[in-house]
Amino acid sequence: MLDLLGSSERSVSDIATHFDMSRPAVSQHLRILLDASLVAEARHGRERRYRLQPAQLAPVRDWLAQYDRFWDDRLQKLQTVLAKGGGK
Amino acid sequence: MSKSIRKEIVVPQPREQVWRALTEPATLAEWMFPNNFEPRVGHRFTFRVPGNPAMNFDGLTVHCEVLQCDPPSDLAFSWAAGALADTRVSFQLQPIGEGTRVVLEHSGFDVTSPFGQQAFAGAAHGWTRMLGQLSAAVQKLVGV
């Protein structure tokens, strides 16, 4: 859903067409994302539209990037340990 | 809405040797951290990541529980550290010729729930910084 909201601002019904979810389920999902400040809501007449707040995602991306590097380091070390005969 | 990290390496050693490197605490400590791992489902254990005063890093304890242990192919444990809760680390060992393909997956990085509303804004940043220091500390420690 975040990928979808990253490309443009969308209404609930528009979002619902992209997922195998009911409109109320989509609304509930959006409520969680709004509470976490991951998306922002704007009114256009009677319709509400939603868009991604990319800055709020940075911590998750950083976190993933850090762990990505962490596991590269660990697996490299595992290879070294195995080559030395570790586990034999 | 969960993200995961997946990595694969192929090593020339047979599965049985790789399995022991993953499940013997002393060997596991050589490439991870000091631990009290035991190869049985339900066992709770920790990795104790040493601090590095020079880098203002106090050290860290990773809390884990063995979720799957099927020698010599599948090992999985939960992984909780700092504000990061409820993630899962799994290793799958597949024979490939004389050697082994090691598939690592670290899953359950949820964009919304595990961080919690406050953790998301604050602790995630703190932890990111800490993990950065951790990487550097580890490199110093192992002399990479």
Image: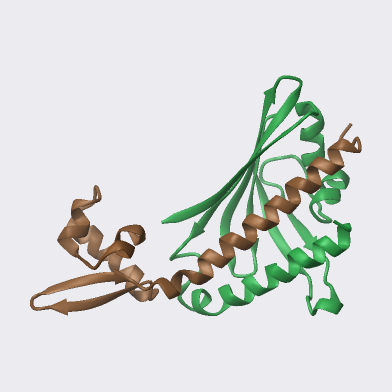
Q: Quadrant of residue B18?
A: top right
Furthest-front residue in view? A7
Chain whose colour in the figure is brown: A
Q: Looking at the figure, which quarter contains the C terminus of chain A?
A: top right
Is residue B69 at all visible to an observer of this figure? no
Q: Quadrant of residue A52?
A: bottom left
- Is residue A65 visible to us here? yes
Q: Which chain is green?
A: B
Give left or right: position of B129 versus B49.
Answer: left
Residue B30: x, y in percent?
A: 86, 49
Where residue B56 appears, x then y in whole percent? 79, 80
Residue A28: percent from left, percent from top = 27, 64
Can you say whether B86 is above or below B95 in the image? below
Residue at image location 81% in from the left, 67% down from the top: B137
Task: Give the residue displayed 35% in from the left and 69% down from the top.
Answer: A33
Residue shown at the point (22%, 58%) measured from the top left:
A15
Check the image and report above or below for B142 versus A53: above
Query: Which residue is depicted at the point 59% across and 61% down?
Result: A65
- State the count of labels: 0
- Relative image position of residue B11 (x, y in whole percent): 76, 33
Q: As drawn, is A2 to the left or to the right of B123?
A: left
Along the horizontal axis of the image, is B139 left or right of B80? right
